[in-house]
Image (cartoon, rainbow, N blue to C red):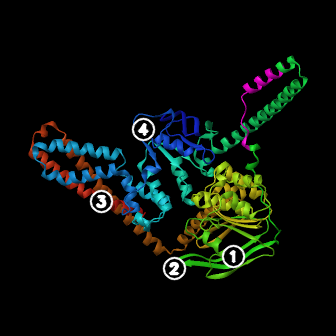
Amino acid sequence: MILSCNHIEKAYGVDVILKDVSFFINEQEKAAIVGMNGAGKSTVLKIIMGEISMDAGEVTVGKDVTVGYLAQHEDKDLNDTIHGAVLHAREDLLEMEGRLRKMEQQMQDIPHERLEAFMEDYHQLQKEFEEKGGFTFRGEATAVIRGLGFTDDEFEKPLSQLSGGQKTRVGLARLLVSKPDILLLDEPTNHLDIASIEWLEGYLKGYKGAVLIVSHDRYFLDRIVTKVIEIENKVSKVYKGTYSDYSRKKEEARAVYIKHYLEQQAEIKHQENVIKTFRSFKTEAAIIKAKSREKQLEKMEKLDKPVELRQDMHLRLEPGIESGKDVLYAEDLSKSFGEKHLFSHVDLDIKKGERVAIIGANGTGKTTLLKILNGLLAAETGTVKFGTKVNPGYYDQEQQLLSEDKTLFDEIGDEYADMTNTRIRTVLGAFLFTEDDVFKRIKDLSGGERGRMSLAKLMLSKANFLLLDEPTNHLDIVSKEILESALNDYTGTVLFVSHDRYFINRTATRILELRDQKLYNYLGNYDYYLEKVAERQQTQAEQEKADNSVSEGQLDWQEQKKQAAAKRKLQNAISKVEEEIGRLEDELSVIEEKQADPAIATNSAKLNELATKHFDISQKLEPLYNEWDELTNQV
């Protein structure tokens, strides 16, 4: 066990956030903290890091355990580059590397009486550098930066030129490169496209340390974690297994809980009727029995009303009118921004009742395409036509049409005058605005709250064709499930952009992938898309193998002979370099043995001579290593 949280409590005044949260994390364990927005998930991480205090409880971190937390790795030097900032996450190795280079330069000038001690310090530092990964950390940093979606030509880009999302990715890269014993990750998939999320999944699954994740990305969690810590009603409960295992066990537990709740409610109603009957008798004995029953009822430990029985947890969307069969037709669309070309010859044909997801890497033009379809951007070529009686509704987090001075309640009530107060609260509750939240003014909302409010209005718009850009951003898991259910029951048509693979899998009937400046069509959900991608990659690999085989067979004898000669020449060159490296490394070993010989330890002249030879050979080895690396890459 490397981390333990026992009976954590936290409140802000009378607002209790955490009442009893307990769990532990073992070495190399991958765990998730889940719960609704405001349940206290991020608060738990901040308590573990000591950023905020707890009112009661205990957090224990194992001896010598290092803890990494994304918020602690925000870069301060905006003049640094992406590559430089990530490398500086291992300041310890950079400092050791600098000391080694400096000591190598000093070897020839060290007085003989200090040389033995100097060489001992050098070898000890070199050994520590190697044990901490000093010879591999630069390559690992490069792999992490690429994995998180940065291209090679962005490596030297200053942090000052990055967006907020890009800076967050740099912070995540720094954290991964620092390799703490336990990673605390709060929404790590934010600002990542699907390819980067999949890379991060693979990285975390193979990570040698422990990982504790707060995330609303269910697909991501399902592929990584083996333990789920749920925070609900201010207390925690631990489930062993994947996220899907947790979800299934949770549903089973909820069913049992609802059964007990309904049984208890029936018993309470029965006892209240009995008490009412006894009181109607007016006799002293009956009144005594009534009071006795009342005391028993008061002592009963009441079960909280289950979430599933609350009316605000269901949302139903109904189009105002029914559209025709043909909803949207687009032909030969293309778009560029300056020298950045996004896509060409894009065709779309959306039919009534379809739920179509547009996916693709960041920067491929998904949002741009959605804006062109909605008339907010002009295409360079092509046409867009809506079908008969199509009433589109658009959700774009960057352009939210809300009245700044109105409250949330009035924003809905003024536009939909026929809605009752209860119905308005129901809709707002489904999008996480409860109790006094409904009287907040629009201008006081955060970016995430504005997004949720815009989505709530769109759901009431009676549109029969919804165009949604990242609709699940800022929604917790329960709210995502509500939206999924609403879209699946929706009789209109939906076209949406999303990175949420679980959401796509649950809602999409067709997937359009924007890749290589073109649109590729898959008639199914996300799992179907993955199957087809795997089939395509296998077919491509087989075709390439066949093409190579045919190409080799078509080469004439002279060309084959020429290639074989080139291969032999390359292998000979590699062998010669390897022989030279081996010879020089043997010489180094002999020198190091002599340096450790007690008979030579008192001979300062000899030690100085050996140190000079050691330095000269080390200098010869470095370019040989580079030459070997270049040659082997040509094989």
Residue at disc 2, secondary structure: loop
The amino acid on which the numbered mark 1 sits, given as a three-letter code, is Asp
Q: Earlier in the sequence, mark 4 or mark 2?
A: 4
Q: Earlier in the sequence, mark 3 or mark 4?
A: 4
The amino acid on which the numbered mark 4 sits, given as a three-letter code, is Val
Residue 624: mark in rendering: 3
Q: Report how far apart the C-alphas of labels 3 and 2 lie in the structure.
A: 45 Å
User: Does the residue at mark 1 contact the one at mark 2 (Cβ under 8 Å)?
Assistant: no
Q: Report how far apart the C-alphas of labels 1 and 2 lie in the structure.
A: 22 Å
Residue 214: % across, % down: 56, 47
**Which of the two discs, 3 and 4, sits closer to the camera?**
4
Left/right placement of residue 453 relative to residue 297 reads: left
Q: Report how far apart the C-alphas of labels 1 and 3 lie in the structure.
A: 54 Å
Residue 464: % across, % down: 77, 67
Residue 622: mark in rendering: none
Residue 47: % across, % down: 49, 40
What residue is shown at x 49% (from left), y 44% (from top)?
Answer: 46
Q: Earlier in the sequence, mark 3 or mark 2?
A: 2
Which region of the structure is painted magenta?
289-307
User: Does the residue at mark 1 contact the one at mark 4 (Cβ under 8 Å)?
Assistant: no
Q: Is residue 22 above or below residue 177?
A: above
Q: Earlier in the sequence, mark 1 or mark 3?
A: 1
**Which of the two discs, 1 and 2, sits closer to the camera?**
2
Please name whichever residue, 585 or 8, is drawn nearer the observer in this view of the structure: 8
* Residues packed near mark 1 inside 10 Å, few (<14), some (14 to 19) or many (20 plus): some
Name the residue furthest bottom. Answer: 381
Q: Which residue is mark 4?
A: 65
Please name whichever residue, 279 or 534, is drawn nearer the observer in this view of the structure: 279
Residue 70: % across, % down: 47, 50
Q: Which residue is mark 2?
A: 338
Residue 347: mark in rendering: 1
Q: Main secondary structure of the magenta part?
A: helix
